[in-house]
Image (cartoon, grey):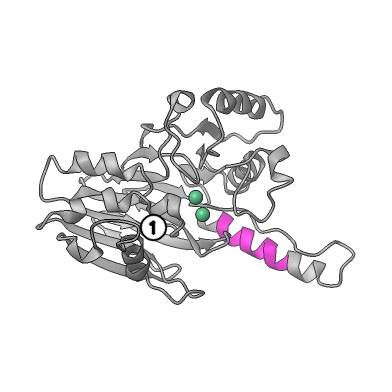
Amino acid sequence: MIINLRGVRGSIPVPGKDTIKYGGNTTCIEITTDEGDKIIIDGGSGIRQLGNELMKQLPVNCSIFITHTHWDHIQGLPFFIPLFVPGNNIDIYGSFDPVYMKDLKTILAQQMEYCYFPVRESELNANITYNNLKEGEAIQVGSATVTPLLINHPVLNFGYKVESNGKRFFFTGDYEPPLNIYLPEDEGYIEYQRLIDQQKQILTNFIQDVDVVVADCQYTREEYLTKKGWGHGTHDSCIEMARAANIGTLYFTHHDPTRTDQELDRIYQEVMSREDLPSTEFYIAKEGTIIEL
Ligand SMILES: [Zn+2]
Ligand SMILES: [Zn+2]
């Protein structure tokens, strides 16, 4: 399969001279299987240009998997032109929101209400299916199997594992390793820590020996001290994930919108100079990076 990183920025698109090298578009990953099936993970602003390219060959048949419905993961969908064109077949997958009791279609339609957008969801003329996924429910897209795993974020967030012809890829979506809300001297500390360790082990087992992981790494270890509970990972959390699961290659993604190209390079150099790194190859995710598996 071929993986194309179409958007690697977190929170909000940041075009401009300081983000030319790594890109300013928000999250979108395009996966093409060996047989040509098209899987798209997340509809951040990076999906707009992908849509324009897909329109060159009609009909467009693709499956879009949404990790979660924070703006930076869905804000490009109203600009994904294949959705408007009759004859295209687009299957959209994501989670039901049990807190606000909304399904995926409702959330996406609300993003297209008149107060936000001039065209209504009902005017999307492609053949669209909306599918609320359950954790662990594997979806077959051609030769590829896509399996969601719930991992920690302020809203339900699916990490997706994509397996095809013996190759395996995993994207975390937005992920902060769970934190113990108790102090070590508190009564609930040990029990809570046991739950956290269980959750981490489930993730480790799920991605054991995966070839390529793209992982949320919005903050440095220094920044994280004041951003605990905001739902994002650090270089340290990505490195630990890679070490525990024996990951081949890991791309740091979901770059903070304040991060310039220069800063990304500087931070990467600092992280790579550490002495206790596992054998995983680490890279900074860059818009337009193409990974062949
Ligand atoms: Zn995000
Ligand atoms: Zn998020």
Q: Quadrant of residue 216?
A: top right
Q: Residue furthest front?
A: 115
Which residue is drawn at the image coordinates 62% and 59% (left, top)? 201
Q: Residue furthest right?
A: 185
> Picture coordinates of residue 288 (x, y %)?
36, 32
Give whichever of 188, 82 is nearer the camera: 82
Asked if residue 235 lies in the magenta stretch, the reply is: no
Which residue is drawn at the image coordinates 35% and 51% (left, top)? 43
Give whichever of 242, 155 is nearer the camera: 155
Q: Amino acid at mark 1?
A: Ile
Q: Could you tell me what secondary structure mostly forms the magenta stretch?
A: helix
Tell how many labels.
Answer: 1
Asked if residue 200 lies in the magenta stretch, the reply is: yes
> Picture coordinates of residue 143 (x, y %)?
26, 54
> Picture coordinates of residue 209 (x, y %)?
51, 47
Q: Is mark 1 within 8 Å of ligand 2?
A: no
Which residue is drawn at the image coordinates 52% and 25% (left, top)? 261
Residue 221 falls left or right of residue 145: right
Query: Which residue is tagged 1?
Result: 66
Q: Secondary structure at mark 1?
A: loop
Image quadrant occupied by the C terminus? top left
Which residue is drawn at the image coordinates 38% and 45% (left, top)? 28
Q: Does the image show residue 172?
A: no
Residue 222 falls left or right of residue 239: right
Image quadrant occupied by the N terminus? top left
Give whichever of 105, 146 is nearer the camera: 105
Q: Quadrant of residue 95?
A: bottom left
First to last magenta residue range: 194-204
Number of residues whose C-alpha sits closer than 10 Å to that of mark 1, classed few (under 14), some (14–19) or many (20 or more): many
Q: Quadrant of residue 122?
A: bottom left
Residue 182 falls left or right of residue 82: right
Residue 29 falls left or right of residue 216: left
